[in-house]
Amino acid sequence: MKEFLLIDRIVAALGEAAAGACVRIGPGDDAAVTATPPGMELVSSIDALVADVHFPAAAGPSLIGYRAIMVSASDLAAMGAAGGFILVALNLPEGDADWVAELARGMAEAADQLGLAVVGGNIAAGPLAMTVSVHGFAPTGQALTRAGARVGDDVFVTGHLGGAAAAVARGDLAGCQSSGDLDVLSHRYFRPRARLSEGVRLLGLASSAIDLSDGLLQDLSHIGERSGVGFDLEAPAIPVATGATLTQALSGGDDYELCFTMATAPPPLDVALHRVGRVVAKPGIRLDGKAADPSGYQHFAL
Amino acid sequence: MKEFLLIDRIVAALGEAAAGACVRIGPGDDAAVTATPPGMELVSSIDALVADVHFPAAAGPSLIGYRAIMVSASDLAAMGAAGGFILVALNLPEGDADWVAELARGMAEAADQLGLAVVGGNIAAGPLAMTVSVHGFAPTGQALTRAGARVGDDVFVTGHLGGAAAAVARGDLAGCQSSGDLDVLSHRYFRPRARLSEGVRLLGLASSAIDLSDGLLQDLSHIGERSGVGFDLEAPAIPVATGATLTQALSGGDDYELCFTMATAPPPLDVALHRVGRVVAKPGIRLDGKAADPSGYQHFAL
């Protein structure tokens, strides 16, 4: 399978996912060209997913591709950005065209659901890994950051937490080949939903936001550092996913829900919303009054 | 070495390279925020560089980092884009902070030279590889593409070709640790210069353009396919780099010079410019009248 034929298979699998309102030139030239809407700024992030580090390589490629897009786009949600585009770099040990086409189909499904266009990519020989560069639009000067939490704000999270960590702990994710193989826990791992529309609705309302990739305590500690505040959390208020433990909900990672702070009552969202605590002046995080260790998932932690 | 300390080292090594006129929010939040200048569109590309596939892992990290940025930004030059930003995803087998800081210094040097800001990144555990997402600005509707070559246009290339391929063929690149170790050939490999300012000067003048990453014949064949034309090249006109062969200049790859077509005399550029042939109606590429094989570097070619 030659590289260019492989690219043809990918572009075919992407179909309409390569198009979008912002796209002027899509896949096929040296670079893609997009237009940023007037009054908007571009919000950009990059994420890498390495085989058997960030996903089980033996799992179904459509599941791997879908999750890769959702995981990466979650950073846009945390900034209140939406409506942009994606570039994907794929490192492959060999050119298995059917595997790659299934991967691209999973990516296209996720991109379609999020309203993001896949405008370009790269294929390279190498150990299996993919890197996803995501780009969305936010009104000029209004993107949500980690830096605005104020003492007295309430802390909220979307959805339920710990389900993906419980699925990882169960140890059977590599056996999942398609959506039909998923139960409630493996679904939480393979089919997270980046909260782009929810993030947009928080613009001008939330004082700070972050997405939950490394666990609530660790991610919240980033808001604490950047905002110069601390947090008092209430354990009974943490929305623990069915089948997960409180520890998994606090420190498990891979949830890709939003955590945000707000001084007022939050707007109605299409996803469950829980108030889990409040912003305080004292640095650090307390859970029911006791100091909580914010360490979550870290690469290279010794 | 914890991930966050490693990121601190990288951000420190980047220094001013993280800033730029378009940057609203740089490294440190869920995503970076940039502003696209009025009247401009965004030009975006992604490239992956895998250890011992796309660069010798034993070479000096500042050389590897410098080259990674130049190689990736070359796609912007081919579109006539400049003045944007970069995201870098780094997959590391271990967290060697000194190695990573040197890599970042090499990246910062290249980004500074090109006027691109390094606004964000990602560090992941995995086999050594880096993926660079590059973004520049081009006047709305004017980006150069591969699709506009017309019969009768002349074909030009910048610089001299084949030097990087000759360096690869010599087989001693892994021994290069810093700029001081480079001779004329290894300099061509490790210190290519993405032709951003040259690409900008070709806007509105060149009918098509591409950067030379896979070899002149293969890259030119992409212009041929997208433009529906062919090429008659003249072997004596090919600017062969000192120490390289004509074959390396035609098919070697890794030059990162520009190739473009133009109906008129080209504007003065700060780099040597050579007319190597002309655009003809007959598909394919002829060299001194004989059919030339456009196959250059291809991943997964069997």
Image (cartoon, coloured by chain):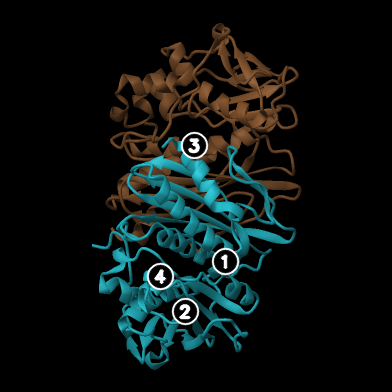
Chain colours: A cyan, B brown
Q: Mark on residue A4? A: 3
Answer whether labels 3 and 4 touch (C-beta < 8 Å).
no
Q: Position of residue B88 (x, y in %)?
A: 46, 49
* Circle nearer the N terminus (4, 2): 4
Same chain, labels 2 and 1: yes
Instruction: Give the secondary structure at mark 4.
Output: helix
The answer to whether any part of residue A214 appears in the image is: no
Same chain, labels 1 and 3: yes
Q: Mark on residue A113? A: 1
B103 to the left or right of A46: left
Cα–Cα span, label 3 and label 4: 32 Å
The answer to whether any part of residue B222 appears in the image is: yes
Q: Mark on residue A169? A: none
Which quadrant, please, contains the N terminus of chain A?
top left
Cα–Cα span, label 4 and label 2: 44 Å
Q: Residue at x 46, y 18 (%)?
A: B162
* Circle nearer the N terminus (3, 4): 3
Q: Position of residue A194 (x, y in %)?
A: 51, 69
Q: Residue at x 49, y 56 (%)?
A: A105
Query: Which chain does tag 3 point to?
Result: A
B43 to the left or right of A54: right
Cα–Cα span, label 1 and label 4: 19 Å
Residue matched to label 4: A180
Answer whether labels 2 and 3 touch (C-beta < 8 Å).
no
Disc 3 marks a residue whose amino acid type is Phe
Q: Residue A47, relative to residue B110: is it above or below? A: below
B7 to the left or right of A275: left
Q: Residue B217, relative to residue B42: is it above or below? A: above
Query: Which chain does tag 1 point to?
Result: A
